[in-house]
């Protein structure tokens, strides 16, 4: 609901504002007098994006003492976007939560459910900061049902939902769910515009950790191809990128060379046994992948060499891979053989692509040899006009 507009506040704010913001204040006054709400909204958005307005309370003051006076004239989604920017200038998370909760309640109508989700999820962000994990989950579940009922959703609304959902799963140490939601969040934003360099590095680090620690994540393809990963290259976490690629190629030697770095990430150091099992599984997948489909019956001894495991642990490793559906096949415990019929597809690096090309070339060569043999044996079938 609109509130009364105090024009004297705008005059005082104009005089007190940084010099580069004063023309915007003057424009606010002109557009408000003419009741040009759309143009006024655009001018306000320009103000909120201006670097000088990041000075403590400037954006919040503008929202509370000016934007609120014509709030009903503004598109609901754009209003929430302005409120979210303003909420970041509260010194106490509880105040920001109350501010956004009140806004969400005021726009909870059938016509503005998308904006309601936006405000609710941004309020849930502050709930999470305040430690209200259950309240955050309740907001996520409620908003998920609303979003599922829409045919299309604004990118910013989805970004808010996936970002807060990812942060929730991070708090709960649910690595696979964080990985999924965080990648979906990145699909909804412009990395260079919406994230600072620090944010990009932090997001890439968290994604790398979740990929490594997720007990159902054995395909890093989407992350390895995502530009967010390049953010690590010039940071202290560059080794995490190298480790991801070593896992993707099942390179146990490279993994072991990176083990000293685990001390800088206590959560990885605590899960070193799990990481070693995971790299062994990836090495098994790589070993199978390198072989032709006619050469995928592996002895336990061969697998032991490829994975650097004692031979008495090979059967358990293969059974683990089968249960995770990383491979398909069967075990012959008596003959100590594993017959693999399928291996999970994944993103290939350049050496793996080169190996695949060589196998394809060899296959093409064999097909040509068979064709020439058949042609020689039955030339009457190959007579051309």
Image (cartoon, rainbow, N blue to C red):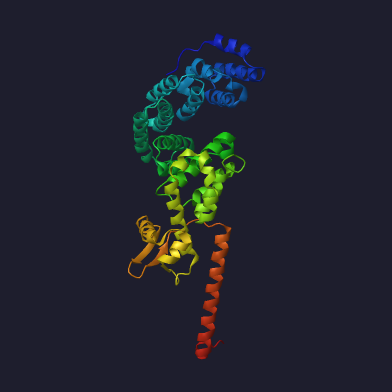
Say which quarter of the image contains residue 139: top left
From where the camera sits, is residue 316 visible? yes
Q: Quadrant of the C terminus?
A: bottom right
The quarter of the rendered structure image containing the N terminus is top left
> Where residue 297 sits in the image (x, y, percent)?
41, 69
Q: Nearer the viewer, residue 66 or 174?
A: 174
Question: How far across and down, in percent of the image, does residue 338 sit?
Answer: 38, 66
Residue 358 vertical position relative to residue 4 in the rendered view, above or below: below
Q: Residue furthest right?
A: 19
Rendered view: 296 above or below 230 = below
Q: Is residue 304 left or right of residue 354?
A: left
Q: Position of residue 272 (x, y in %)?
A: 45, 46
Horizontal side of residue 222 vs 14, given as left or right: left
Q: Position of residue 6 (x, y in %)?
A: 52, 10
Q: What residue is shown at x 42% (from left), y 46% (from top)? A: 214
Farthest left residue? 334
Residue nearest the viewer, comparing 60 with 270: 270
Foreground: 338 or 191? Answer: 338
Image quarter for residue 15? top right
């Amino acid at each position: 609901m609109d509130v009364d507009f105090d024009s004297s506040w705008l005059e005082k704010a104009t005089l007190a504002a940084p010099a580069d913001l004063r023309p915007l204040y003057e424009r606010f006054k002109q557009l408000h007098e003419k009741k040009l709400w759309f143009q006024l909204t655009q001018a306000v958005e320009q103000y909120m994006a201006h670097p000088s307005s990041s000075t403590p309370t400037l954006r919040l003051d503008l929202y509370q003492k000016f934007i609120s006076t014509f709030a009903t004239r503004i598109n609901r989604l754009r209003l929430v976007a302005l409120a979210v920017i303003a909420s970041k200038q509260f010194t106490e998370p509880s105040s920001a939560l109350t501010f956004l909760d009140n806004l969400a309640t005021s726009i909870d109508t059938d016509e503005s459910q998308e904006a309601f989700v936006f405000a609710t999820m941004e309020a849930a962000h502050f709930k999470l900061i305040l430690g209200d994990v259950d309240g955050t989950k309740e907001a996520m579940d409620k908003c998920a049902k609303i979003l599922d009922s829409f045919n299309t959703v604004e990118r910013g609304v989805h970004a808010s939902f996936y970002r807060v959902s990812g942060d929730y799963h991070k708090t709960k140490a649910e690595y696979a769910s964080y990985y999924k939601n965080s990648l979906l969040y990145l699909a909804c934003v412009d990395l260079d515009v919406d994230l600072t360099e620090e944010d990009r590095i932090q997001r890439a680090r968290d994604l790398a950790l979740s990929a490594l620690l997720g007990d159902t994540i054995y395909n890093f393809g989407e992350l390895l191809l995502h530009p967010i990963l390049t953010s690590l290259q010039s940071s202290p976490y560059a080794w995490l990128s190298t480790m991801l690629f070593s896992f993707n190629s099942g390179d146990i030697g490279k993994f072991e060379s990176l083990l000293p770095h685990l001390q800088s990430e206590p959560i990885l150091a605590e899960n070193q046994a799990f990481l070693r099992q995971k790299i062994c599984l990836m090495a098994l997948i790589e070993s199978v992948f390198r072989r032709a489909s006619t050469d995928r019956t592996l002895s336990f001894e061969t697998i032991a060499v490829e994975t650097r495991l004692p031979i008495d642990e090979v059967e358990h490793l293969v059974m683990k891979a089968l249960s995770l559906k990383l491979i398909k096949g069967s075990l012959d415990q008596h003959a100590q053989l594993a017959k693999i019929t399928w291996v999970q597809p994944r993103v290939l690096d350049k050496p793996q692509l080169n190996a695949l090309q060589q196998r394809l070339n060899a296959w093409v060569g064999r097909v040509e040899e068979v064709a020439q043999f058949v042609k020689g044996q039955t030339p009457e079938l190959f007579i051309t006009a």
